[in-house]
Amino acid sequence: MGIFDWKHWVVILIVVVLVFGTKKLKGLGSDVGEAIKGFRKAMNDDEKPAEPAPAQPTQAQPAPGQSAPLNQPHTIDVQAQKVEEPARKD
C-alpha cells in the first residue's frame, strides 16, 4: 500500500485542483511545457558549432600624456599558481 497507492494519488489530485483551481493548473502546465521546450532548444543550440564572431576594429592608442577613454575595458591577463606554505612549528 503506502504512498504509491493510486487511491492516495487521486485524493491528492482532487485536493490540488480544489486549492489551486483548473485555470492556474492549466497555466502552470503550459509554463512548464514552454520551459522544457526552451531548455531543449538551448541544449540543441549548444551542440551546434558556434560561428566565429566578426573581427572588431582595434581602437587607436591615446597619444603620450593623454589618458585612455573612460568607457574602454581594461583586461589583465594572469595565471593563478598554487603556493605551498611551510609547515608551522608550535
Image (cartoon, rainbow, N blue to C red):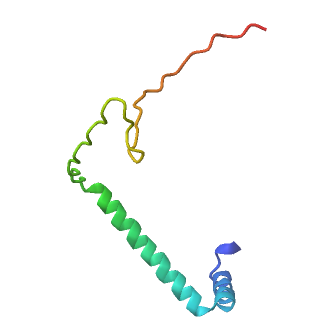
Answer with the quarter of the image where residue 21 lies.
Answer: bottom right
Using the image as rendered, state which of residue 65 and residue 44 is in the foreground.
Answer: 65
Above or below, 79 against 88 in this view is: below
Above or below, 11 against 77 in this view is: below
Relative placement, left or right, of 32 versus 74 is right
Using the image as rendered, state which of residue 79 and residue 15 is in the foreground.
Answer: 79
Kindly identify the residue that appears in the image at 21 percent across and 50 percent down.
52
> Can you give x and y, in whole percent of width and height, for residue 68 in the image?
37, 39
Answer with the quarter of the image where residue 2 lies.
Answer: bottom right
> Can you give x and y, in whole percent of width and height, for residue 25 in the image?
57, 86
> Can you give x and y, in whole percent of width and height, for residue 70 in the image?
42, 45
Above or below, 53 against 1 in this view is: above
Answer with the quarter of the image where residue 10 lies.
Answer: bottom right
**In the picture, which quadrant includes the N terminus?**
bottom right
Kindly identify the residue that appears in the image at 63 percent across and 10 percent down.
86
> Can you give x and y, in whole percent of width and height, for residue 43 in the image?
35, 60
